[in-house]
Image (cartoon, grey):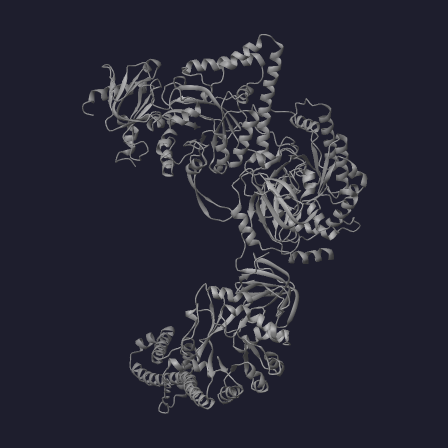
C-alpha cells in the first residue's frame, strides 16, 4: 500500500502538456496512408508485459507496431511523423478476458447449446465509445452466462475498419458454467416441444440432467465421453462437441468453489483440453505449483467482486464457514504459485467495464506492483485468449492498439487522453477545460511561506487550489514544473507601457487611461517576459493620474486611477505654496462632497422615518373620519325599517363592507407616500390597522394629531470633473504618489501629503528617501525606488537604498520607468539582493507590498481566490542566475521559454 | 383524343377482353403502337415525339419515324410520357396466406400461394408495376422460394416470369437470440454443403452419373443467363431438375433449394434487420459462396460502407427518411437513407412493403420512393432506373424487361406527365403488348375520387 502511495505521488507530478501534443496528433493524423511511419515519444512506455521503458518511442506503420524501445535505441526513419507526447505514459489497449457484449434481445432456451457462437451475436456497429474511452480495445465475448453450456466465445476488437477485421478469434473457447447461475433454471434443460411441424418434428427428449452440481457433472462427463468416442453423431450437440474436442478448443469453466473447480479440472483432464477457470473463490486447487507447469493451464480470470460507485452489503458469514480470501490475496497467492503470466482480471459486470483501469489497482492491495497489475488487464488476458501475438503487449509486429495516459497508470488524477486501435485514433478525450490548469512545482512562494513540492489549481484565471494535494478541476491541463520555483506575478510601480508609445502629455486628473490601452502590444509582450504581470502607468509630465493594469494581450485595467502622481521640484518654497493650494482646493471639493454624502445619508434616514410617521398620521386621520362617518351611518340605519336592518346585518355581509373599506384606505395611503417601499408597505398597513382599531377603542383625540414635517433634501455641490479624482484621494481609496528630488523635498512631501492632509502617500525617491528612512517609517509612507537601487558614495562606498529602507521598516516597491525594459526589473532588484537586500523583502516589494498598499486586492500573492498571475523560475527568485521559464497572467500562459 | 375515339373504343374493348379472359391467345393479338409521346427508354435516353411499335408482346420498333402498319391499334401519346413498367423486386404481398410460422422451410414455393386476383396485383397495374418478385416474408429464417411474375394474368402460370427465382433468408430472430438463429442457419447450410460433398463423392464412384450431373448443373441455375426463354420452358426445366435430384439422392426436399443456394446457382434474398445482420450476411455469403440479394432494414445504413464493398445492388427499407434519437446525446437526427447509401457508393432500389406487408404508402407507390430519393439528392435518371432497369438486373430478367428496347417484352406504362410528379397519373399499363389497365375505365378509382365518396 505504501509503495503504491509513493508511486501515486510521483505519477501525479509526472504529467503532460497534453494540448500541444494533442493538437499535433489531430492535425497530423494521416488518412490511412499505408506506408506512413508514425513515432509516439513519451515519458514512459509500459509494454503491458511487466516492462517499463522510460523515455520511450513507439513506431507504428500501417496499424502495426514496427518497434518500441528507448529513444536512443530505436531507429526512426527520416520521413516519420513525430508525435511528442511529453510526460504521457503509453500502455497497451486493455484486453478483457470475459464479457457478455453480445446481442441478446431474446433469451436462449437450451441449457446445453455448444453450437451457439458468440461471434454471431457481436454487433460491430454498436457504439463502443464508452469502452474505448476507458482504454479497452479488445474483449472476449461470451454467448451467455446463465446456462450450463451456453456456447462458444470469441475475441473481438471494439474498433476496426470492417467487421471481419474486428474479429480476432471466431472460436476462442467453449464455456461451461458450473456455479449456481448455470444450474438455473434447474429443471428446464430443453424448451417445451410446442407445435409439431416439418422443421420441428417430435424427437425423443434428451436425457435430463439433474439440478445439483453432481448431477450436472455426471451429465457433462457422459456428454464428453460420448463426444470423444465417435465423431459421426446425428445429435447436433454431440457433433459440435466432438468437432471441438478434435480442434483442441479451450474449455472455459465458471467455477467458484473447490468442488466446482475440481469437477472442471477432472473433466478437462479426461478430454485433454486446455482450460481457463473463471471467477474462482476458493483457490486451494489452483495454487499448487505443478498445475501451472502443465501446458493445458491457460489461466485464471478473477472477478474483482466490486463495482466502483456501488457499495455491496456482504452477508455475515455463517459460523464455522470457511473464510473467503479477498480477491487481492487470491491474486497474490496465484502469482506466487507461478501463475503470474496467466492471471487476468475482468470487470464484475459489463456495466463496470469502463472502470477497469481503476478497479485493477485493487490487486495492488495484495502487493502486486503497478506493472504486475497492468499485466492482468493487458498481456495476461491476451495470453489466456491466445491472441498475445497481436494485442495486449506493446512489441514489434503486434497491432498498434495503445492508450495514452496523462500520467502513470493507476495513479489518481491520471486521465486517459486517447485510445488507438490498429494505429488509428478511436477515442480522444475532449473534456479539456481550456481555462483550467494544474501546475506542479518544486517550490511555491506564498505569503505564508514557501511550499515545497506543491501544486496550484487554476480555473478561469483564479487560483482555486493550493497545496501539496489539490483537487483536480475536471479536464484541467496539467503542467509539471517539478524542479522550478513559482512566485507571484510582479508589480512595476511605474512603467511606460501599454499605450504603444511614450506618454508625456499633461493629463488632467479626470482622464481615464484604461480605455486607451492598446491590444496585442508587442512592447507589453516583451515587457512581461521578466515576470512583471502588473504595471502602473502615468504620464511622464506630472501631475498625472495613474492606472494599474495587467500585461495581458488585451491589457486589463485593474484600477483606474489607482493613484494620483504629483511632483515636488524646483524652488521648494514656491512648490510648497502651490502644492498646498492645489491640495486644499482638492480637499475642499472632496469635503463638500463628503458632507453632502453624510447629509444625504441622514436625509434618507429622516425621510424613511417621516414616511412611517406620515403613514401613521394619515391612517389615524382617516380612521377618525371614518368613525365619524360610521356614527352618522348608524344613526341613519336606526331610522330604517326592521326588514332592511335584518338584511343588512347578516353576518358576512357587514364584515365584507368593512374589509372592503380598509384596503381602499391603504391604497390612498400608499398613493400619498412619495417613495413607497413595497417591503415596508405591509407592516405599515398592519400598523395602521392596529392603530385604527386602537384609536377606535380609545375613541379619542382627533384634534391632537400633528402632521409630521417632511425633511428637506440637502443641496448637491457642483461637480467638477477636474477635481473629481480628489474625492477618492481624500477618502484614502487612491494613493498620492509624490516624486521628490532631494531630502528637503522628502520632508516637504511627508509634511504636506501625509501629516497635513492625511493622505495615503507613496513617495518616489532614491537616495533621498534612504536618508529619511526613519521619517518615512514613522509616518507609514510607502516608498517607490528604482530603477537605480544601488549607488556609490564619494568614498566608493555602496549605498543599497532598498536595503536601508527595508531595515528601517519602510514598505518599499520598485519601478522601472521603462517600456520593454520592464522585463529587466527583477534583474535590477536582484542586484540589490546581491548587495544585501533580503530576498523576502525584495519579493514583497515586487508583489504583495505594493498590491496591498495600492489596494489591488486580488494580485500580488499566491493564495486561493487571487488572480492566477504566476511566474515560473528555474531557481530561487531574484538571483541573476535564475531565469524565467514561464509567465501566467489571469490563468493564461503569456510567456514560455522556448524549449531547447 | 377526339380523333382517336374509335381506337380508344377498340382499346377499351380489348382491355375488357384482357380483363375477362386473359389467355395465351390474347397475347398473340395484333400490333399496338403509341405515337407522339415522350419516351423514357431508361437504357437509351429520352425520345421526344416518339413512337413505340409492339407486336406479339415484344417491342418491335422505337423512334420518331416509325412506319406504323395499318392493322396496328394506335394510341395517341401526345403530351404523355411512356416509360418501362416498374419492377417490384421484393414483396410479400400477392400471396394468399403466406407462411409466417415454420422457420425452416426451404422447400416452400410462393407459386403455390400466389393469388392472381389479389388486390395487390390490381393495385400494381393501377400504379404501373408490370413485374413483381413475390418473396416469402421476413419472419422466417429460411422462408422458401420466391417467384417473379407479371402483374397481369388469369392464372399463375400465365403470369410467371421465373419460378423459384431465389431463396429467402431472414436474419431477424423470431425465437432465441441471433446467435442461435445463426447457429441453426449454419447447421442447415452445412448440411447442404455436406450433402453436395457426399453427392460428389458418390458420383465419383459411378461412371454415368458425372455427365448427368454436369448437364443438370449446366441446365440449372435460374439465376444464370439462359436468355430469352419463355416462362413455360423455364418451369419445365426446373421441375425436371427437381425430379432428377430427388431420384438421385433421395434426401429430404428441403435440402434441394439450399444445395442450389450454396452452389451460388439460386440467388438468396437475405433480409437484414439491423446493421450487425449485414455483417453476418456478408460473412455467410463469403463462407458459403451465396449469390446474395440484400434486403435492408432501416438501421442497416450503419453498414453502408460494408455494403459498398460488396458491390451489389441492395433493396432499401420502405421508410426512406425517418427520425432517430441518438442514445448518447439524446438528440434527434434525421436519417435520409437514399443520400447515405448514395454517398457511400451503394447502388440501391426500392420496396414499398415491409416484412409484414404493412406500408404507409400503399403497396405500389414506387414512384413516391423514387421521388423521395430525388428530393434527397439522387439524380432523377438514376431514380427512374432504380424503378425499372436496376431491379430487372438484380433479378436477372433485364434481358426481358426493365427498359424500352427493341426485342424486349412490351411492358410499359403511359403516364399523364413526368414520372416523379405527384400530379401524374398512370394512364395505361401495358403488359406483354396488351393494355391491362386504363384509367378511364377504372371504376374503383372514379368512385374513390368522385365527390360523393366519403
Q: Is residue A715 above or below residue B366?
A: below
Taking the image as shown, residue B81 lies to the left or right of residue A866, namely left
How many marks overall? Answer: 0
Image coordinates of residue A444 in percent, x first then y, are 63, 67
Q: Is residue A649 visible?
A: no
Taking the image as shown, residue B367 lies to the left or right of residue A207, namely left
The N terminus of chain B appears in which quarter of the rendering? Answer: top left
Residue at left offset 77%, top offset 32%:
A269
Image coordinates of residue B363 in percent, x first then y, are 39, 31
| Residue reaching furthest to the front | A795
Image coordinates of residue A335 in percent, x first then y, are 76, 45
Q: Quadrant of residue A221?
A: top right
Q: Is residue A138 above or below residue B41?
A: below
Nearer to us in this view, A612 or B430: B430
| Residue reaching furthest to the left | B3
Residue at left offset 77%, top offset 34%:
A266
Nearer to us in this view, A355 or A781: A781
Q: Is residue B46 above or below residue B451?
A: above
The C terminus of chain B appears in which quarter of the rendering? Answer: top left
Q: Is residue B278 above or below residue A445?
A: above
Image coordinates of residue A882 in percent, x first then y, are 62, 66
Nearer to us in this view, B162 or A883: A883
Q: Is residue B127 visible?
A: yes
| Residue reaching furthest to the top | B208
Amino acid at each position: 500500500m505504501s509503495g503504491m502511495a509513493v508511486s501515486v505521488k510521483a505519477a501525479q507530478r509526472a504529467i503532460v502538456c497534453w494540448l500541444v501534443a494533442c493538437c499535433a496528433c489531430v492535425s497530423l493524423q494521416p488518412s490511412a496512408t499505408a506506408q506512413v511511419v508514425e513515432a509516439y515519444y513519451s515519458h514512459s512506455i509500459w509494454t503491458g508485459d511487466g516492462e517499463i521503458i522510460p523515455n520511450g518511442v513507439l513506431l507504428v506503420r500501417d496499424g502495426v507496431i514496427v518497434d518500441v524501445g528507448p529513444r536512443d535505441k530505436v531507429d526512426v526513419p527520416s520521413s516519420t511523423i513525430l508525435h511528442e507526447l511529453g510526460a504521457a505514459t503509453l500502455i497497451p489497449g486493455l484486453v478483457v478476458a470475459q464479457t457478455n457484449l453480445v446481442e441478446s434481445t431474446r433469451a436462449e432456451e437450451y441449457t446445453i447449446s455448444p453450437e451457439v457462437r458468440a461471434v454471431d451475436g457481436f454487433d460491430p456497429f454498436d457504439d463502443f465509445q464508452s469502452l474505448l474511452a476507458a482504454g479497452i480495445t479488445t474483449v472476449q465475448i461470451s454467448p451467455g452466462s446463465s446456462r450450463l453450456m451456453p456456447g462458444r466465445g470469441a475475441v473481438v476488437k471494439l474498433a476496426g475498419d470492417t467487421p471481419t477485421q474486428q474479429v480476432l478469434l471466431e472460436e476462442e473457447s467453449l464455456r461451461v458454467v458450473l456455479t449456481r447461475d448455470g444450474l438455473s433454471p434447474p429443471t428446464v434443460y430443453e424448451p417445451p416441444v410446442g407445435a409439431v411441424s416439418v422443421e420441428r418434428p417430435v424427437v425423443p427428449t434428451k436425457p435430463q440432467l439433474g439440478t445439483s452440481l453432481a448431477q450436472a457433472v455426471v451429465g457433462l462427463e457422459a456428454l464428453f465421453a460420448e463426444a470423444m468416442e465417435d465423431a459421426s453423431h446425428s445429435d447436433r450437440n454431440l457433433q459440435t462437441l466432438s468437432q471441438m474436442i478434435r480442434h483442441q478448443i479451450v474449455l472455459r469453466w465458471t467455477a467458484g468453489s473447490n468442488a466446482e473447480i475440481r469437477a472442471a479440472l477432472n473433466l478437462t483432464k479426461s478430454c485433454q483440453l486446455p482450460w481457463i477457470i473463471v471467477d474462482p473463490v476458493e483457490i486451494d486447487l489452483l495454487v499448487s505449483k505443478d498445475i501451472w507447469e502443465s501446458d493445458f493451464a491457460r489461466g485464471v480470470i478473477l472477478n474483482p467482486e466490486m463495482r466502483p460507485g456501488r457499495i455491496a452489503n456482504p452477508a455475515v458469514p455463517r459460523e464455522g464457514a470457511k473464510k473467503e480470501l479477498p480477491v487481492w490475496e487470491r491474486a497474490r497467492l496465484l502469482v506466487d504459485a507461478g501463475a503470474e503470466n496467466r492471471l487476468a482480471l475482468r470487470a464484475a459486470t459489463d456495466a463496470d467495464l469502463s472502470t477497469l483501469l481503476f478497479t485493477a489497482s485493487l490487486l495492488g492491495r495484495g502487493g502486486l506492483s503497478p506493472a504486475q497489475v497492468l499485466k492482468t488487464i493487458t498481456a495476461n488476458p491476451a495470453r489466456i485468449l491466445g491472441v498475445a501475438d497481436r494485442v495486449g503487449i506493446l512489441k514489434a509486429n503486434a497491432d498498434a492498439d495503445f492508450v495514452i495516459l496523462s500520467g502513470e497508470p493507476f495513479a489518481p488524477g491520471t486521465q486517459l487522453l486517447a485510445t488507438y486501435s490498429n494505429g488509428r485514433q478511436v477515442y480522444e478525450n475532449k473534456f479539456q477545460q481550456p481555462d483550467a490548469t494544474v501546475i506542479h512545482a518544486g517550490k511555491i512562494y506564498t505569503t505564508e511561506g514557501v511550499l515545497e513540492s506543491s501544486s496550484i489549481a487554476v480555473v478561469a484565471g483564479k487560483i482555486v487550489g493550493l497545496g501539496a494535494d489539490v483537487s483536480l478541476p475536471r479536464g484541467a491541463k496539467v503542467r509539471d514544473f517539478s524542479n522550478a520555483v513559482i512566485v507571484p506575478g510582479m508589480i512595476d510601480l511605474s512603467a511606460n507601457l501599454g499605450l504603444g508609445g511614450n506618454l508625456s502629455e499633461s493629463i488632467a486628473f479626470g482622464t481615464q487611461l484604461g480605455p486607451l490601452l492598446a491590444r496585442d502590444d508587442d512592447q507589453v509582450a516583451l515587457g512581461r517576459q521578466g515576470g512583471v504581470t502588473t504595471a502602473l502607468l502615468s504620464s511622464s509630465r506630472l501631475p498625472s493620474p495613474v492606472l494599474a493594469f495587467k500585461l495581458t494581450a488585451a491589457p486589463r485595467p485593474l484600477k483606474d486611477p489607482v493613484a494620483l502622481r504629483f511632483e515636488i521640484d524646483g524652488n521648494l518654497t514656491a512648490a510648497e505654496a502651490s502644492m498646498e493650494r492645489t491640495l486644499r482646493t482638492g480637499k475642499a471639493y472632496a469635503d463638500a462632497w463628503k458632507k453632502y454624502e453624510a447629509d444625504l445619508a441622514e436625509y434618507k434616514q429622516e425621510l424613511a422615518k417621516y414616511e412611517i410617521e406620515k403613514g401613521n398620521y394619515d391612517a389615524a386621520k382617516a380612521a377618525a373620519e371614518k368613525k365619524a362617518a360610521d356614527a352618522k351611518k348608524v344613526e341613519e340605519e336606526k331610522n330604517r325599517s326592521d326588514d332592511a336592518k335584518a338584511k343588512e346585518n347578516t353576518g358576512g355581509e357587514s364584515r365584507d363592507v368593512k374589509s372592503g373599506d380598509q384596503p381602499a384606505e391603504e391604497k390612498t395611503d400608499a398613493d400619498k407616500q412619495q417613495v413607497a417601499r413595497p417591503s415596508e408597505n405591509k407592516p405599515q398597513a398592519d400598523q395602521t390597522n392596529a392603530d385604527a382599531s386602537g384609536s377606535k377603542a380609545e375613541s379619542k383625540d382627533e384634534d391632537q394629531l400633528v402632521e409630521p414635517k417632511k425633511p428637506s433634501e440637502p443641496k448637491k455641490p457642483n461637480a467638477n470633473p477636474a477635481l473629481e479624482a480628489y474625492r477618492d484621494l481624500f477618502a484614502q481609496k487612491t494613493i498620492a504618489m509624490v516624486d521628490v528630488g532631494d531630502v528637503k523635498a522628502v520632508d516637504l512631501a511627508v509634511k504636506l501629503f501625509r501629516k497635513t492632509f492625511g493622505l495615503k502617500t507613496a513617495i518616489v525617491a532614491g537616495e533621498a528617501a534612504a536618508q529619511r528612512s526613519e521619517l518615512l517609517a514613522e509616518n507609514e509612507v510607502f516608498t517607490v525606488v528604482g530603477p537605480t537601487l544601488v549607488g556609490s558614495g564619494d568614498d566608493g562606498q555602496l549605498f543599497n537604498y532598498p536595503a536601508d529602507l527595508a531595515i528601517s521598516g519602510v514598505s518599499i516597491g520598485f519601478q522601472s520607468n521603462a517600456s520593454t525594459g520592464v522585463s529587466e526589473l527583477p534583474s535590477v532588484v536582484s542586484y540589490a539582493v546581491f548587495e544585501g537586500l533580503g530576498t523576502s523583502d525584495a519579493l514583497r516589494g515586487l508583489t504583495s507590498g505594493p498590491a496591498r498598499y495600492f489596494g489591488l486586492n486580488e494580485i500580488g500573492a499566491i493564495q486561493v481566490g487571487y488572480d492566477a498571475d504566476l511566474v515560473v523560475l528555474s531557481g530561487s527568485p531574484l538571483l541573476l542566475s535564475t531565469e524565467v521559464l514561464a509567465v501566467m497572467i489571469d490563468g493564461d500562459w503569456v510567456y514560455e521559454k522556448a524549449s531547447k | 383524343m377526339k380523333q382517336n375515339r374509335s381506337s380508344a373504343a377498340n382499346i377499351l374493348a380489348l382491355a375488357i377482353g384482357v380483363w375477362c379472359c386473359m389467355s395465351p391467345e390474347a397475347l398473340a393479338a395484333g400490333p399496338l403502337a403509341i405515337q407522339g409521346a415522350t419516351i423514357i427508354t431508361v437504357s437509351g435516353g429520352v425520345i421526344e415525339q416518339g413512337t413505340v411499335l409492339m407486336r406479339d408482346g415484344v417491342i418491335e420498333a422505337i423512334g420518331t419515324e416509325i412506319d406504323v402498319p395499318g392493322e396496328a391499334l394506335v394510341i395517341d401519346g401526345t403530351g404523355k410520357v411512356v416509360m418501362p413498367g416498374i419492377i417490384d423486386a421484393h414483396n410479400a404481398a400477392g400471396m394468399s396466406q403466406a407462411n409466417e410460422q415454420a422457420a425452416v422451410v426451404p422447400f416452400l414455393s410462393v407459386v403455390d400461394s400466389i393469388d392472381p386476383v389479389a388486390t395487390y396485383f390490381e393495385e400494381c397495374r393501377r400504379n404501373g408495376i408490370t413485374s413483381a418478385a413475390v418473396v416469402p416474408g421476413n419472419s422466417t429464417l429460411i422462408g422458401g422460394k420466391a417467384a417473379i411474375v407479371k402483374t397481369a394474368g388469369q392464372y399463375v402460370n400465365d403470369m410467371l416470369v421465373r419460378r423459384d427465382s431465389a431463396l429467402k433468408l431472414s436474419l431477424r430472430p423470431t425465437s432465441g437470440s441471433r446467435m442461435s438463429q445463426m447457429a441453426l442457419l449454419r447447421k442447415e447450410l452445412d448440411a447442404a454443403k455436406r450433402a453436395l460433398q457426399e453427392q460428389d463423392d458418390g458420383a465419383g464412384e459411378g461412371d454415368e452419373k458425372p455427365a448427368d450431373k454436369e448437364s443438370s448443373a449446366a441446365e440449372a441455375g435460374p439465376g444464370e443467363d439462359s436468355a430469352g426463354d419463355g416462362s413455360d420452358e423455364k418451369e419445365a426445366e426446373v421441375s425436371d431438375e427437381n425430379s432428377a435430384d430427388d431420384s438421385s439422392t433421395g434426401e429430404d426436399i428441403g435440402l434441394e433449394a439450399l444445395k442450389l443456394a450454396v452452389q451460388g446457382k439460386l440467388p438468396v434474398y437475405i433480409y437484414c434487420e439491423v446493421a450487425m445482420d449485414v455483417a453476418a450476411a456478408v460473412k455467410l455469403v463469403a463462407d458459403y459462396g451465396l449469390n446474395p440479394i440484400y434486403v435492408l432494414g432501416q438501421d442497416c445504413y450503419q453498414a453502408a460502407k460494408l455494403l459498398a464493398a460488396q458491390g451489389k445492388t441492395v433493396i432499401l427499407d420502405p421508410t426512406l427518411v425517418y427520425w432517430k434519437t441518438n442514445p448518447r446525446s439524446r438528440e434527434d437526427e434525421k436519417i435520409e437513407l437514399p443520400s447515405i447509401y448514395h454517398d457511400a457508393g451503394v447502388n440501391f432500389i426500392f420496396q414499398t412493403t415491409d416484412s409484414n406487408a404493412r406500408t404507409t404508402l400503399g403497396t405500389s407507390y414506387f414512384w413516391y420512393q423514387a421521388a423521395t430519393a430525388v428530393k434527397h439528392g439522387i439524380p432523377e435518371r438514376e431514380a427512374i432506373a432504380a424503378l425499372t432497369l436496376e431491379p430487372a438486373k438484380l433479378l436477372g430478367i433485364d434481358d426481358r424487361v426493365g427498359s424500352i428496347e427493341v426485342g424486349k417484352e412490351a411492358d410499359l406504362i403511359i403516364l399523364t406527365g413526368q414520372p416523379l410528379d405527384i400530379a401524374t397519373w398512370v394512364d395505361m399499363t401495358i403488359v406483354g403488348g396488351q393494355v391491362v389497365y386504363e384509367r378511364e375505365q377504372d371504376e374503383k378509382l372514379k368512385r374513390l375520387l368522385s365527390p360523393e365518396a366519403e
